Image (spheres, rainbow, N blue to C red):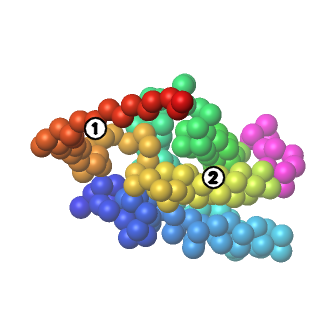
């Protein structure tokens, strides 16, 4: 069973995988990001913050590789040049740029947290809080953009994303109009004579 092609369960026309991704982000990842931030503020780095941030980073890479990269490459990139001003192309592109930068910085931070003592001094940034805050903000903005993409592609009246390949199931059946059996009767001409 391919979750990318199975109809979703939220009634929007999305696939099961798109519905699951939306639910996972709203119910698990966004709260986990905020919980991880809370533990960092309380200085519980090794016991709580580090494992939470590592799990989010790894899970994000899984989603990027399994779902987002393929979806962007197939559904957005081929028509991006002439359609960038349309929300169905602009939102995924902003999601890619902002989320990608946050994910790269998050990966750096996870490597730094786990291998702090083995890394050379030149590899370590001085103000790590700035990078942690950038990562959290980038992740949250990317998550909101992802929700916007879901709404634009699936919930805003369309049954699938606008750039998805056209299949027999996704196109409405065209039924030609029936020709009238008889021509309408000609109407008699009416002439109006001027008075007087």
Within 10 Å of the Cα at label 2, are there few (<14), some (14-19), or many (20+) other Cα atoms?
many
Is 129 situated left or right of 31 in this image?
right
Q: Secondary structure at mark 1?
A: loop
State the residue position of label 2.
145
Q: In which quadrant of the rendered view does residue 144 lie?
A: bottom right
The reply to whether the magenta stretch includes residue 60 is: no
| Dot 1 or dot 2, earlier in sequence | 2
Against 32, residue 151 (above or below) is above
Seen at 45% across and 30% down, the residue is 193
Is 81 situated left or right of 35 in this image?
left
Q: Position of residue 134 (x, y in %)?
A: 78, 51
Is 150 situated left or right of 140 in this image?
left
Against 157, residue 93 (above or below) is above
Q: Is residue 57 visible?
A: no
Seen at 51% across and 64% down, the residue is 22
* Of labels 1 and 2, the one closer to you: 1
Is 129 situated left or right of 56 in this image?
right
Query: Rounded to the nearest whole Å, what is the CA distance between mark 1 and mark 2?
Result: 61 Å
Q: Which numbered disc covers residue 174?
A: none
Q: Position of residue 154 (x, y in %)?
A: 46, 56
Nearer to me, 86 or 149:
86
Q: Is residue 149 visible?
A: yes
Q: In which quadrant of the rendered view does residue 164 lie?
A: top left
State the residue position of label 1.
187
Within 10 Å of the Cα at label 1, are there few (<14), some (14-19), or many (20+) other Cα atoms?
few
Total numbered labels: 2
Seen at 78% across and 44% down, the residue is 124
Q: Secondary structure at mark 2?
A: helix
Whether residues under marks 1 and 2 lie with C-beta atoms below 8 angstroms apart, the answer is no
Seen at 72% across and 69% down, the residue is 34
Against 150, residue 29 (above or below) is below
Hey, which residue is sitting farthest left in the picture? 181
């Amino acid at each position: 069973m391919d979750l990318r092609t199975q109809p979703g369960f939220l009634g929007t026309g999305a696939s099961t995988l798109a519905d699951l991704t939306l639910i996972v982000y709203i119910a698990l990842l966004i709260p986990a990001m905020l919980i991880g931030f809370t533990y960092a503020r309380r200085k519980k780095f090794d016991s709580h913050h580090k494992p939470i941030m590592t799990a989010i980073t790894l899970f994000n890479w899984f989603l990027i590789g399994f779902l987002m990269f393929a979806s962007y490459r197939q559904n957005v990139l081929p028509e991006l040049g002439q359609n960038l001003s349309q929300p169905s192309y602009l939102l995924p592109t902003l999601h890619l740029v902002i989320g990608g930068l946050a994910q790269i910085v998050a990966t750096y931070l996870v490597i730094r947290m786990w291998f702090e003592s083995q890394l050379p001094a030149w590899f370590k940034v001085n103000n790590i809080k700035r990078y942690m805050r950038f990562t959290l903000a980038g992740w949250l903005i990317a998550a909101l953009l992802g929700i916007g993409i879901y709404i634009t592609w699936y919930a805003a009246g369309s049954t699938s994303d606008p750039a998805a390949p056209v299949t027999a199931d996704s196109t409405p059946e065209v039924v030609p109009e029936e020709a009238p059996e008889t021509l309408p009767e000609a109407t008699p001409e009416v002439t109006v004579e001027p008075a007087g």
